[in-house]
Amino acid sequence: MKPIKVGLLGIGTVGSGTFNVLQRNQEEITRRAGRGIEIAMVADLNVERARELTGGKCEVVNDANLVINNPDIDIVIELIGGYGIARELVLKAIANGKHVVTANKALLAVHGTEIFKAAQDKGVMVAFEAAVAGGIPIIKSLREGLTANRIQWIAGIINGTTNFILSEMRDKGLDFATVLKEAQRLGYAEADPTFDIEGVDAAHKVTLLASIAFGIPVQFDKAHVEGITKLQATDISYAEQLGYRIKLLGIAKRNGSGIELRVHPTLIPAKRLIANVEGAMNAVLVQGDAVGATLYYGKGAGAEPTASAVIADLVDITRLATADPGHRVPHLAFQPDAMSDTPILPMAEVTTSYYLRMNVADQPGVLADVTRILADHSISIDAMLQKEPAEGESRTDIIILTHQTQEKNVEAAIAKIEGLPTVMGTITKIRLEELS
Ligand code: HSE
């Protein structure tokens, strides 16, 4: 059988990784896919560089439209990124009857509903394993390997940049700004790291995971997004003393009649495997009712790890291209007409535990006032740490870990406690998940 023809839009880090891995492992990939997979065309604005990278082995053009309008191309790989031109090209490729492979989580998290509907109507596939956690086959695992389960929750370290920064802050006791500069110098963080450090990248990814896990439409606009920029080295150290590590988690969880969809710094017990995922590595913990907890670990970025995911999608599409569209694995794991309208809950209705740090006057009755307010809001204390006041100081830090409660209770209690004359400034609140 003739090889399936692929057009690549954008040959940067992941694109060149994909080209190289396909060349290197061509024989084994063909044996798996049942026919050859050939990148026949590459579109990139830097034609010279693209020619160098592909070594004359395929046609190079500077206009992506030449690829998506070419009737010989069966699959388009979109590695341009962003929401603008990428959306336009993906929709045009679908309209032209091409299957699409993309690593673009931002595009799918924001415009996924439109894109998957267009693909469904046209009978083509949109595959996106590379969009979440790079080389870790988490989409495949959730959509197929765990298909027997009612998924209860997912908690993932799905942004390598922030995990690197948090690991360095903990190891070296440095503050956020210092580590960010170092991460940029070493190439772990981008020149403009906003999407990573503000939690947006992780929120794009967990939005996609939530859709596949629960069969709900992609709803990035409903996700709670909180990054690590305000995290203090003090809290990382106090958390450690209480037996916890702080990680930026993407969490998707069933809760009563709704779904929690949130990204924020989170205390997790130091003894959990996922708490020990360090540096730029990614890991996703999935709790299913039948299987229990399963953990997926690996590289969340980089040329060849991400290429591994892109090529897995190419092989899947190659195998299924001739199948009746009704018999393919649905884009979002659930059949399009069986999607659920379970709402994403507002943060006030989220249920979790909390780390609260407050600076108080070291005098009788202060703790009693604080604990009374917590009790009045039905908040139960799980653990407490009180530091000795520094030499000559009459103030000290108190750290309280709560049992599970609703966020609205904690917010109301914090407002009351901050109003006490013995409590200085604002209270630091970090959410805590036992992940058990
Ligand atoms: N910027 C991402 C990260 C990698 O730091 O994990 C691409 O998704």
Image: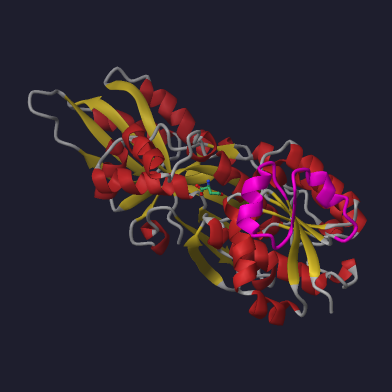
Q: Which residues are magenta?
A: 43-72
- On screen, residue 188 versus residue 236, left or right, reads right
Q: In the image, is residue 288 above or below residue 340?
A: below
The image quadrant of residue 65 is top right
Q: In the image, is residue 143 above or below residue 164?
A: below
Q: Residue 39's x, y, as percent?
A: 73, 62
Compare residues 179 and 362 and report the one nearer the observer. 179
Q: In the image, is residue 70 above or below residue 179?
A: below
- On screen, residue 338 versus residue 215, left or right, reads right
Residue located at (35% from left, 44% from top): 401
Q: In the orientation shown, which residue stands out farthest toward the bottom?
A: 31
- On screen, residue 247 versus residue 37, left or right, reads left
Q: Is residue 66 magenta?
A: yes
Q: Is residue 400 magenta?
A: no
Q: Judge whether residue 359 can be spotted in this image.
A: yes
Residue located at (74% from left, 42% from top): 86
Compare residues 67 and 266 and report the one nearer the observer. 67
- On screen, residue 241 versus residue 431, left or right, reads left
Residue located at (27% from left, 37% from top): 234
Q: Residue 159's x, y, as percent?
A: 50, 49
Q: Judge whether residue 383 can be spotted in this image.
A: no
Compare residues 385 and 417 and report the one nearer the observer. 385
Quarter of the image with the N terminus is bottom right
Q: Residue 433's x, y, as percent?
A: 44, 51
Residue located at (25% from left, 45% from top): 172
